[in-house]
Amino acid sequence: MHELSIALSIIEGATEEAQKHNGAKVEAVHLKLGKLSGVVKDALLFSWEIACQGTTLEGSRLEITEISVVVHCENCKTDRTLAEINNFSCPVCNAPTSEVLQGRELEVTALEIIE
Amino acid sequence: MTQTRLVEVRQNVLKHNDVLARQLRIRFQEAGVFVASFVSSPGSGKTAFLEKTLTMLRPNYRIAALVGDLATANDAARLSRAEVPVKQIETGTICHLEAQMVENALGDWDLNELDCLFIENVGNLVCPSSYDLGEALRVVLMSTTEGEDKPRKYPTIFNTADVAVITKMDLATAVEFDLKTARASIQAVRPGMKVFEVSSKTGAGMDEWRQFLQSQFVAKAETLLLETV
């Protein structure tokens, strides 16, 4: 489980960003989490509270938007969303698809701050 | 009056690791070192496979290895039998290698004196998938004793790897390993991935693996040549 160290990295980045806004209090951190990022949502949420303790982010929320895996199907010449990450084939024509366009994200997109 | 405001940021959480990995990749390229990393679950035979690979390449190439484990230097001691420079990275409680650990471990090694560097990650099929180490080739291993559906259970690590190696082929019959299902399982999570079937014990399949590595060295040298022209 590496979600705790991921949580700590997010806190570090959010703290730096908050400092740019005169040390404003961070109420929530918005995160895009790709299903192929290797990070588990529940484990990250579990780690969040612990990781925030004793930092300026104590009591803050972590708002996670999960990002599905989107691949390009060469056969259909169309981008397709995969329902599961253990079957990389086009949900329509069943052709194998290896070109991943989306789903590896692990990115902080916004902060809710109180000024 | 206080009010809540939404501030947009675009921050890659693993930026620190990604930046370091990119720097390492450039360093490796400039020194002309081909770097391959091995990932797998604990006990799948990474160290035995690495030992065999090192012994096989040693007569013709200048090679070295970094091996990661939570504790003990047993693997480095074992690999020293291959008579190539080996360093152990003890990660403590950390379940994966990060680019920083690789950079620290390289220490005083002169990369210009190497043709190839192998990095053996901590035995773990989950966490290493998120961390780029600056390698040119990521090799995922699974053994015949683990079950054919391992790739479907751990799709992320298989999807982020470049080639797969099925180890302990000498035990395939004894454990009723279904090769066809295993191959289909790999292709389901990473269509088109090249798969090797080897036995570190008997040496079966090792020649094909050696030829593949050599073709990678040649491809790399040619890219370098093109870049310098």
Image (tube, coloured by chain):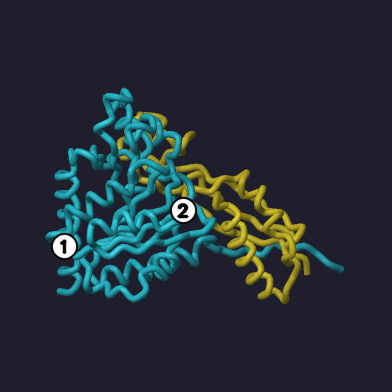
Chain colours: A yellow, B cyan
User: What is the x, y in percent for residue B43?
Assistant: 39, 42
Q: Is residue A108 left or right of residue B191?
A: right
The Cα–Cα distance between marks 2 and 1, rounded to whole angstroms, is 30 Å
Q: Alpha-carbon neighbours of circle 2 within 10 Å: few (<14), some, or many (≥20)?
A: many
Among numbered discs 2 and 1, the one appearing first in the sequence: 1
Q: Residue at x 42, y 44 (%)?
A: B42
- Say what secondary structure mark 1 lies in: loop
The residue tagged 2 is B130
Query: CB atoms at circles 2 and 1 under 8 Å apart?
Result: no
- Three-letter residue code for mark 2: Ser
The residue tagged 1 is B61
Chain ID for label 2?
B
- What is the quadrant of residue B151 in the picture? top left
Work out whether residue A30 or residue B126 is closer to the camera in this orientation and state it.
Answer: B126
Instruction: Name the image quarter holding the C terminus of chain B.
Output: bottom left
Q: Residue at x 39, y 68 (%)?
A: B105
User: What is the x, y in percent for residue B191?
Assistant: 31, 38
Chain ID for label 1?
B
- Say what secondary structure mark 2 lies in: helix
Q: Is residue B74 left or right of residue B35?
A: right
- Three-letter residue code for mark 1: Tyr
- What is the quadrant of residue B134 in the picture? bottom left
In the image, residue B196 above or below residue B64: above
Q: Residue at x 74, y 64 (%)?
A: A54
